Image (cartoon, helix red, strand yellow):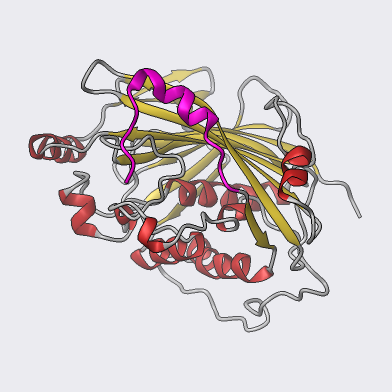
Amino acid sequence: MSTAPALSQLEGELVRRRLPLIYDYLSPQPSHLLNLSLNSLLTQTQSSSPAFNEAQWRLPSITNPNFMPRCHHLIYFPPQVPSPELLPDGCDELHSPGQPFNRRMWAGGSVQFFGEGGPLLNGQRAVCVEGIREVNIKGKEGEEKIFVGIERRIATMDEHESDDGVRDRVWTQSEEDQGDSIVIERRNLVFMKDRTSDEIEASKATESSPRRIMKGDYGSTSIYYFQTANVWLVVSTNPELIQTIIPSKALLFRYSALTFNAHSIHLDRDYACNVEGYDDLLVHGPLTLTIMLTVFQSHAASLGQTVSSIEYRNLAPLLVEREMRVCAARKSNGSSGSWDIWVEGNDGGLAAKGTIRTTPVTPN
């Protein structure tokens, strides 16, 4: 396992790090399995169970393929790292600054989708070109946190295209340049030092304490103020869309399997509680994003719209088998195709917040 260079050298070392290309075949199977795991959960009510529909749950045809649903790119292009090279927490070290920054969290990011439908799930070969765009070190001496901004660019490709040809065609010096990408994703990870036993107990006490929530009325719109990490955030309490789900252990396991993610914080309760200091297993950051966009895209489709981009922040952990509510409301500034989206945790506090932009779907 590598040791982190001096903090003064760390930013340059990470940004210059050359990450391997990640290849995949866009088979319908992973997307189909994600739909099996999510759709019944998102439609099930407490009083009824969804009826099994054999035709609905049949694997889609590869000769008459569907487009990749929004955010399903997250279950393709997993890091292809041999098991012996994984870190003690089950993660890879591709983006890690090294010791002593052994803990990691998914802090947020953004995704841009190009085209109305996304790539076809017809078995074609595709590639993810990944690089570290930005590194920020925050916190006083001895309590530093390292924020790593990762960009992932997804494109289809010819079977025999060279690695250098792929990089030249897909990766661009400017983050604003699409190149040949069909999806551009920004992931913001934060790396932290291991917690002491006292810090773990303090974290558990904080987790169990209710967060402050205040209400106010502004014209015809009610507002909630959520205090998260000492920052007051505002969301409308009159959402156009509300969806409540309870993420199960089975869902966390299946999502870990689909994303080839062995991070113990999602799989090992003893690790999550006794090493990381949480009350239970954590819902994956990308799973939260997947749930948000799955819920919202269904609503957008009913309006003749499709998601073109999302920017979001994860503000508080979501725990397994606790209720979470996905809410969305049109932005109050009246801008067309712009929405606030947020996730409330079991205590009513804000766990994630973002902005979605949509574009009209062209009629067939």
The tally of labels here is 0
| Quadrant in which residue 25 is drawn | bottom right
Q: Residue at x 52, y 28 (%)?
A: 15
Taking the image as shown, residue 78 lies to the left or right of residue 246, namely: right
Question: At 78% across and 47% down in the image, what residue appears?
Answer: 304
Quick one: quadrant of the C terminus?
Answer: bottom right
Q: Magenta region: which residues?
A: 1-20
Q: Is residue 74 left or right of residue 169?
A: left
Residue extending farthest left:
198
Q: Position of residue 62 (x, y in %)?
A: 77, 74
Q: Nearer the viewer, residue 353 or 271?
A: 271
Residue sitting farthest toward the bottom: 54
Q: Is residue 88 above or below residue 202?
A: below
The picture places residue 142, in percent across and down from the top left corner, at 21, 21
The residue drawn where x is 53% and y is 17% is 219
Q: Is residue 347 magenta?
A: no
Image-quadrant location for residue 191: top left
Q: Nearer the viewer, residue 323 or 354?
A: 354
Q: Is residue 139 above or below residue 72?
A: above
240 left or right of 346? Answer: right
Would you say residue 10 sits in the magenta stretch? yes
Q: Position of residue 78 (x, y in %)?
A: 54, 56
Q: Nearer the viewer, residue 273 or 194?
A: 194
Rendering coords of residue 190 (x, y %): 38, 33
- Residue 183 vs residue 148, the one in the foreground: 148
Is residue 236 visible in the rendered image? The answer is: no
Say which quarter of the image contains residue 75. Answer: bottom right
Relative to 283, say whether 314 is above or below: above
